[in-house]
Image: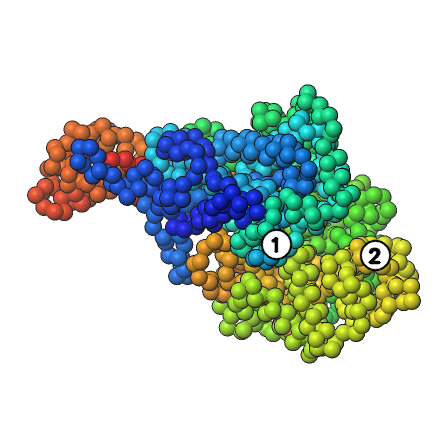
Amino acid sequence: MVASVGRITAGTGYEYLTREVATSKHDYYTGAGETPGIWTGRGAALLGLAGEVDADDMAALYGRFVVPSTAGGTRLPSGRWLHEQVLGRKVSPRTRPDGTVAEPIAAFDVTFSPAKSVSLLWALTSHHVVQAAVLAAHDESVAVALEYLDHHAGHTRSGAGGVRKVHGDGFVIAQFRHRTARSTTPGERVGDPQLHSHCAILNRVRGVDGKWRTLDSKAIYRHAHAAGAVYGAHLERLLTERLGVTWETPNGRVPMREIAGMPADLRIRFSTRRADVLATYDRLEAEWRDVHGRSPTTAERADMHQQATLRSRNPKSGGVSELHSRWRAECTSSELVDVDRAVAQVPNVERVAVDGGRIPAASDELTSAVFDRLHQQRSWWTRAHIAHEVADLVAGPTLEAIELETERIAQLCVPLERDDDFEYADHDAAKLTSKTILDAERRVLTAADDSTTVVVPARTAAELGDDQAAAVRALCTGDRQVQTVVGPAGAGKTTMLRSVADSWVAANREVTVLALSAAAGRVVTNDTGLPAHTIAAWRVGQVDLPRGGLVIVDEASMVPTLTLDHLVRVANASNTRVALLGDYAQMGSPEAGGLLRDLAAKPSAVELVAVRRFREEWERAASKRLRAHDPEVAAEYERRGRIVGTLAKQATVSVCDAWFADDVNDLESVIVVETEAAAAALSGRCQELLRVGDRLGERVTDSCSDGNPLHVGDVIQTRRNTRELATSDRTRVLNRDVWRITGRSANGEIQAVSLTRRATVDLTPEYVAADVVLAYATTIAGAQGRTTDTGHVVVTPRTSSAATYVGMTRGRQCNTAHVITDGHDHAELDLGDRPAAQAFADAVTRTGDGQRSAHAVRADWKSGAPVRQAARTDDRRTRAAVEWWERVRPQLPPAVVTALDGHEHEVIDALARTTSDQQRRQAVRLAIRSTRWDQPTAGRTFARALATTLRPSTQGASPNPSYHRYSGREFGR
């Protein structure tokens, strides 16, 4: 159950909602159109909007922010002409630094959608009563979720930089309920059943002060995730009460629960829009990054993948028969029986608790479960994150229960951004953490300062650079219990580790490497000779730390904080030194993390500074600028021909053709993308190029786990560790091992040879179907730590700086960015393409993905106190000046008031320079006397005289030049 947020621009951006409305009953029943939208929200009532949404009203309100009843102007009975009433400031597009036009945001399309099984129950049941019950439960749950969102995000902000929160009088919402996902191909077949409601929340709200302003968009995005969970929890409760359905979590996955008993095959069959989902996911995450300044967590990404099923650029297609009949015709008789059985024959209307692992409110079990989930996602959180987990876990999930439990658990958290200034504090946005996280971070950071006696003589090889030699000495003769070594991609970590291994072995001391994956550990072993194990194996007791020796943690930036803390404590107890190797500029932990950046700032930390991987000297320097988020480096890559602009629909062809050219020249190449789905699609295209070029042999299976067929000669990747498939070198088949197919045995097993060692394997059909993918393209996580001849990375509007950096540092000889230049705004816009170099620079500076530790968040909050306090002081002075002027202005001569029209923001700016009413009165008198009011420039002369008079009385306080950024909002006429 999810809620997505899309942006609707002023002008005609809203039309993708109104054009879906059916023009006749026949269109509605055949799926060619939807029911009209309805007005909802307290703000809509303020504007006199109710009932069905009219297209003209939408055009006025969502196109130009004009109150519909005044659109076009109205002649009053008195004969006076009433002009259009605009809510807040008038619509005016702005020009970006790169010259493209950014249209104002008219509304936020918050879309609520249930689990797939709920849509299938509604679509496939033979009982009309069940269909009606599902629709009613959906509508009621949307209303509850909007109530939550209105309470927490229905406000605006005022003051320079939005320093002050102003509560609002309610959302204005045009709500449209749709029944289907968009069809894969226009005109082919009715889209898959997918109930969802688009709630177009107008980007204007009336504040409690009576003024209309834009919404606080950050609050909308911050709470949308939780609103989706509130929607889902309420829907589960209603369907259980009214239909007796129960809930399960397929494969134990979080966060999506499904109706128990619904055939899983149906969910797959009615989810056909893979390409559209991927493209829409790109846009949703790009918008998320823009607002939050960071990447979504693993759980938030999972929600976005569900959200992306709701959007597409293709219009919905119609049919020739009734929707439900067509959908039922695609199912077998036994599947339809299972659908009807999912609804209890005799629903227990008194049943309130929802099945599916929900936990009683106000219980220690619920508290522990919520904190466990939070720890699995981040080092800090807000009340919105807590609300999401509470809604997903609490039994009897009414809105009141969710709000109460959220506040109860928030009170158990440790505030990282304590703010006692009640007038300006925003407790909903304030970051929190737990004592568990803070204590774990403190122990690791303290251990980095602790000394140890476990040292050995350093043996530095002659070929080592100065930075590598310094790292070897730190890991051998250094006296830190926890030693951090960081460095950019291609800095020669492996060469350095060989000397470390030689030094410890020569001293008869044991060294163990812990890696995130068995495949990564095997690479370390092959390159350095050091024994390597997975961190997971150590955690379950399969590996002991070397007493009196050294344990090296590879890719430490990706290791969760709680795991690092556990490791450090165990190492201390066994007198084992800990070495943390990694790069905080690359991908971080999927759980609570961010510590490596803090550890790298310690005086004892060592940094590898020289980049050695790349053949070209310029690329070594450029990669370091890339790592430092320097946007100007885009010009260097563009000048060298390393940036290729492409449209989204052409990106697959562009990148695969470039990869194929490398392959023809016998260069090992890799394509780096952000999702498994994208990797599968690109790998399939690469395979087709190889097949057409007669570089592949016979087909050996029709489909592997990514949906692609396999041929002799294909390069594949195994995705699950197993001991059941013995290799010729008597080692396990590991996740992310890379193989080339050589044939198929008589019993159907696929024969392959390893590309990284001398080994062969026979893969069973079952393993191939479930755990083998083509390896021509891979995700960022799969590419990190890998080195090839050439690399190609697809840069989308959501690609992060870390992903860009990893993707552009895989190849020794050449690395190319294939930059998607369209899709940087809402899908319905047509604002032109973004220059490829600018889009690449955007990705380089999109730094939100590196998780920050709780300690870093708290330090940032404290260091920002002077700027924050100055902004609040300026705001208080400005508001006081406005209030004083509002009292004084009626006392001024009419000619003075008339002359000051259009200059009052300058007047307020001058008056805000002092807090003394007496000084203001004196300054106004002097300015009036010194101004010639018969001149056309009288207003400006008065304002300047006022500013000159008050300037000496500021007594060192900074002037308040920010007022004109408020002007129309703070000073009403």
Report x, y in % for residue 38. Answer: 46, 36
Q: Is residue 188 left or right of 634 when viewed as pictured?
A: right
Q: Amino acid at mark 1?
A: Arg
Q: Could you classify mark 1 by the number of other residues whose Cα lies within 10 Å: few (under 14), some (14-19), or many (20 or more)?
A: some
- Residue at left offset 60%, top offset 63%: 794
Q: Is residue 571 left or right of 614 when viewed as pictured?
A: right
- Residue at left offset 61%, top offset 66%: 652
- Residue extending furthest toward the left: 934
Q: Secondary structure at mark 2?
A: helix
Q: Is residue 663 left or right of 294 when viewed as pictured?
A: right
Q: Could you classify mark 2 by the number of other residues whose Cα lies within 10 Å: few (under 14), some (14-19), or many (20 or more)?
A: some
Q: Which residue is mark 1?
A: 189
The quarter holding residue 88 reads top left
Vertical placement of 695 versus 837: above or below? below
Quadrant where the C terminus sits is top left
Report x, y in % for residue 805. Answer: 60, 60
Query: Which tag, 2 or 1, sits closer to the chain's start?
Result: 1
Give the number of the mark in front: 2 or 1.
1
Q: Is residue 810 visible?
A: no
Vertical placement of 492 versus 286: above or below? below
Q: Is residue 973 visible?
A: yes
Question: Which label is found at residue 964?
Answer: none
Q: Secondary structure at mark 1?
A: loop
Q: Nearer the viewer, residue 288 or 954?
A: 288
Report x, y in % for residue 517. Answer: 77, 54
- Residue at left offset 85%, top offset 59%: 765
Q: Which residue is mark 2?
A: 767
Report x, y in % for residue 149. Answer: 51, 34
Q: Amino acid at mark 2?
A: Tyr
Q: Nearer the viewer, residue 844 or 733?
A: 733
